[in-house]
Image: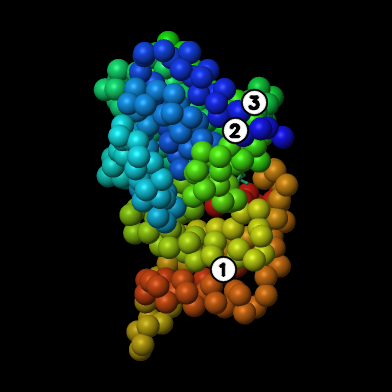
Amino acid sequence: MVDAESFVEEAVAEIREEVGDAHAVIGLSGGVDSSVAAELAYRALGENLTAVYVDTGLMRKGETEEVRETFSHMSSLRIVEAEDRFFDALEGVVDPEEKREIIGREFIREFEREAKEADADYLVQGTIYPDRIESEGGIKSHHNVGGLPDVVDFEGIVEPVRDLYKDEVREVARELGLESVVAERMPFPGPGLAVRVVGEVTKEKVAVARDACHVVEEELEEYDPWQALAAVVGKGTGVKGDNRVHGWIVAVRSVESRDGMTARAQELDWETLQRIQSRITGANENVARVVYDVTHKPPATIEYE
Ligand code: XMP
């Protein structure tokens, strides 16, 4: 296990030596890895570090506010409100892979613009040891490692946590006073809530998925799932008062897994399922029904797209 205190000291000194008086940029995702890398780089470079967080409009409930709060001490934090640009680019697109491509492309565009504006020579990344192994072995096809340096011409790439495992990064985060990002959060896909709405990505569907995901994460905490989520999967008929209405169908999914490659649907008790159902339908009158997904992976995937 890493000695967090001396790690911080050494990492800060190393970044200072590598970057010198130049300017660096980092993409913040709200996750623990990029948060730790950003804090280390900030301690080394101060104002010469620009931290960029792109609000795609596809993030978890409260995520942007959390980032703003956690890094409020960084004067050069840039929160890019790009929601409308992402939704415009996704308009009418229903193919899952095309959605992923558009989101990746838009993200790079936003980040590139910020990096140029900041006149950054160096890119800081929160790559950790398992990321490197996985990308070298080609295991995770949709991993983001290595995506950014190709498009922006940087003088150098700095990866301060490249030799650490996840639990070590968490320890360093505590040492840095970043308690708020340390919590064991479930994996969240890069394209965010876009893969939790089947078909076209609209603000209405994403808002339903966001609120429902929040309910599911809260209600299923005690089951300690590897991943629990909710997705908007289509429309169906329901009744409101004396009227038949055409509302959203929300699917709830909770799985156990070791690495996401295979997964087992979790067995939940009826009361928990009913509580989830009533919270989701109660919060949004346009949700007509809630279903629970009992499919393992394979044959299903974990996300809906
Ligand atoms: P699937 O749905 O393929 O998901 O069974 C396996 C794991 O990968 C995550 N996932 C993604 N992560 N970009 C990501 O960074 C993606 O496009 C993507 N698609 C799925 C998913 O949340 C699960 O943890």
Q: Is residue 275 left or right of residue 193?
A: right
Q: Residues within 10 Å of mark 1 (few under 14, many from 20)?
A: some
Image spot of residue 268 (x, y percent): 67, 70
Q: Quadrant of ligand 1?
A: top right
Image spot of residue 229 (x, y percent): 55, 58
Mark earlier in primary sequence (3, 2)? 2
Question: What residue sits right under mark 1 in the picture?
Answer: 219
Q: Residue at x 58, y 37 (%)?
A: 172
Quarter location, residue 6: top right
Q: Is residue 230 left or right of residue 67?
A: right
Q: Which mark, by number, is residue 20?
A: none
Kind of residue indicated by mark 2: Glu
Looking at the image, which is closer to me, 214 or 137? 214
Task: Kindly give the residue lying farthest to the top in the view shown.
Answer: 155
Image spot of residue 259 (x, y percent): 70, 43
Kind of residue indicated by mark 1: Glu
Q: Is residue 65 left or right of residue 259?
A: left
Q: Residue at x 55, y 47 (%)?
A: 182
Distance of label 3 from label 2 (alpha carbons): 16 Å
Residue 142 visible here: no
Distance of label 1 from label 2 (alpha carbons): 36 Å
Q: Which mark, by number, is residue 5?
A: 2
Q: Which mark, by number, is residue 163?
A: 3
Q: Residue at x 66, y 22 (%)?
A: 136
Image spot of residue 124 (x, y percent): 46, 24
195 to 128, vertically: above or below: below
